[in-house]
Amino acid sequence: MTNNETANRRSLLPLFGDFLALTKPRVMSLLLVSAVAGAFLGAQSTPSLKIIIAVIVGGALASGGAASLNMAYESELDKKMGRTKNRPVAEGRIQFNTAIFFGIILNVGSFVILTLMTNILAAGLAIVGTLLYFGLYTVILKRTTTQNIVIGGAAGAVPPLVGYAASTGTLDLSAWYLFVIIFFWTPPHFWALAIMIKDDYARANIPMLPVVMGIRHTTKQILLYTVVLAVLTILFGFVSHALGWIYTIGSASLNLALFWYAYQLFKEPDRPTATKLYKYSLLYLALFFLLVMIDSVLE
């Protein structure tokens, strides 16, 4: 290999890293876990390898495409926030039009793969998720209302519907129950983050709940949503025929811990306590979907 070839390869690595960053891979990973869990629940067993591959690849493309569109649209906003100022479009390493085109291409790829390998319902739902995240949340809600993350949370609740539809070709009560559970998980998770970076949101003039209504009000809302979420997730074990005692005991334990973190934040509404809740909420959702997958197979 010549020195020029080596130099070219090295110069491509940062570019590859920037395009990967456009897809928000850490966010994507949790969305893919939820989509695969939906596929397990729909199959009430282990889905075929073809379904699993389609859900992972198609889901990754849709999630990555939505993230790229979001990052392009919010590039000026990202420059004002410490957490996001180094993103590829915000720093000019990738152009706005390039990120938009990349996002569209990924979504087209997602639709084609899910249609060919599963069904049109799963493919359509993946695109609906992108439209909700980019169109509803990013463009319309984020800069206009304190309820942005509540209503916009519907976007993050779509992946398990995609997985479920991929396995069954339809949606029933269990699928929509998963949607509702993620919908109610989203506010405590993101409001904890909003408390952590409240000054960033205020500087960018984004009306997140802690910025507009204050941290004390936000902690009350977090506690309320946590209680509703706990009731929903525990009841899910009785609603779904695919789940049994493993899920019920596990979900009760997860919710006890989540309530404890939410209550601690209510008592001590500060950044360190919010950080603990934020981190646990990520673990909570991952373990919740793991329970769904395990019990779907064992039951």
Image: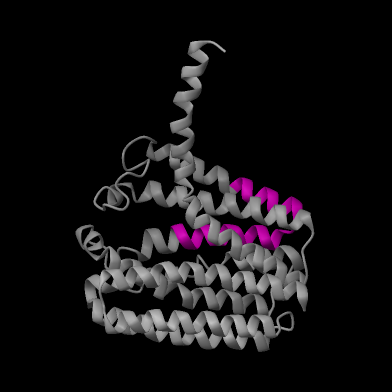
Q: Residue at x 53, y 88 (%)?
A: 231
Q: Which residues are magenta?
A: 108-134
Quarter of the picture holding the C terminus: bottom right
Mark count:
0
Q: Position of residue 171 (x, y in %)?
A: 69, 73
Q: Position of residue 135 (x, y in %)?
A: 44, 59
Q: Residue at x 69, y 63 (%)?
A: 121
Say if residue 64 shows up in the picture: yes
Residue in front for this viewpoint, 157 or 242 = 242
In the image, is residue 16 part of the stretch drawn in magenta? no
Q: Residue at x 71, y 59 (%)?
A: 120
Q: Where 86 sits versus 272, above or below?
A: above
Q: Residue at x 42, y 38 (%)?
A: 97
Q: Is residue 42 left or right of residue 259?
A: right
Say if residue 144 shows up in the picture: no
Residue in front for this viewpoint, 133 or 225 = 225
Q: Position of residue 89 (x, y in %)?
A: 36, 41
Q: Position of residue 56 (x, y in %)?
A: 65, 54
